[in-house]
Image (cartoon, rainbow, N blue to C red):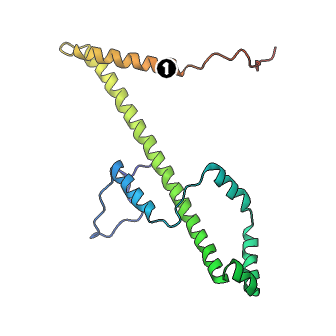
């Protein structure tokens, strides 16, 4: 498990290059929204549109490459579909945006992983606070902690009860064999 707080950057900046300040979540959202506004053809499809377009566009990379030859030899086809150079540029741009897509997905996974680590760190701190408070509540002068410790104990027990698996549905057949 790697964290950016203690990790040396993969590509250290030059000694005289100042590092940009780390973003808080609100600043990151604003930066992301500004970044999205600069991406051409940025769109949101419905689930149905997405599935339709994925199914309707099934053509191999080899067939796409071969179609460039059709455009090269037939000016009539090129007049209708598009000039070969424009089609090749679009093909190359699609490849670069696909690389960008993979990078964004990888970044999203790293954000998810960082949040998992943050949540775990928070849970650990909460458990430590509870366990330490239990000990302090037993010492004279800290009786006020007992109320808080009891509330945490009640909430933890309540959460355990909610996670218990529900009884099996009488309408479903049993998987055990007799």
In-front residue for pair 149/159: 159
Q: List the residue tagged with mark 1.
A: 160
Residue 17 image offset from top left, x and y in percent: 29, 69
Q: Residue at coordinates 36% horizontally, 55% vertically from top-left?
A: 30
Horizontal arrangement in the rendering, residue 19 relative to residue 105 (left or right): left
The C terminus: image quadrant: top right
| Circle 1 crowding by C-alpha within 10 Å: few under 14, some 14–19, many from 20 | few
In-front residue for pair 157/80: 80
Horizontal arrangement in the rendering, residue 37 relative to residue 55 (left or right): left
Q: Is residue 139 above or below residue 25?
A: above
In-front residue for pair 154/90: 90
Residue 62 image offset from top left, x and y in percent: 75, 72
On the image, which quarter does residue 157 sit in? top left
Q: Residue furthest right?
A: 178
On the image, which quarter does residue 74 sit in? bottom right
Q: Is residue 85 above or below residue 57?
A: below
Residue 108 image offset from top left, x and y in percent: 49, 52
Q: Residue at coordinates 40% horizontally, 65% vertically from top-left?
A: 11
On the image, which quarter does residue 137 sit in? top left
């Amino acid at each position: 498990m790697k964290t950016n707080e203690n990790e040396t950057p993969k590509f250290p900046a030059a000694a005289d290059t100042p590092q940009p300040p780390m973003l808080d979540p609100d600043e990151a959202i604003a930066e992301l929204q500004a970044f999205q506004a600069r991406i051409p053809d940025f769109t949101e499809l419905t689930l149905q549109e997405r599935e339709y377009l994925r199914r309707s566009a099934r053509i191999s990379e080899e067939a796409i490459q071969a179609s460039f030859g059709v455009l090269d030899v037939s000016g009539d086809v090129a007049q209708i579909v598009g000039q070969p150079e424009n089609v090749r540029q679009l093909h190359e741009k699609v490849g670069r945006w696909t690389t960008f897509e993979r990078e964004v997905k990888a970044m999203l996974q790293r954000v998810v992983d960082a949040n998992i680590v943050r949540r775990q760190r928070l849970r650990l701190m909460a458990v430590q606070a509870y366990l330490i408070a239990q000990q302090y509540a037993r010492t004279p002068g800290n009786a006020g902690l007992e109320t808080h410790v009891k509330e945490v104990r009640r909430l933890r027990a309540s959460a355990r009860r909610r996670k218990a698996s529900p009884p099996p549905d009488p309408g479903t057949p049993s998987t055990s064999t007799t």
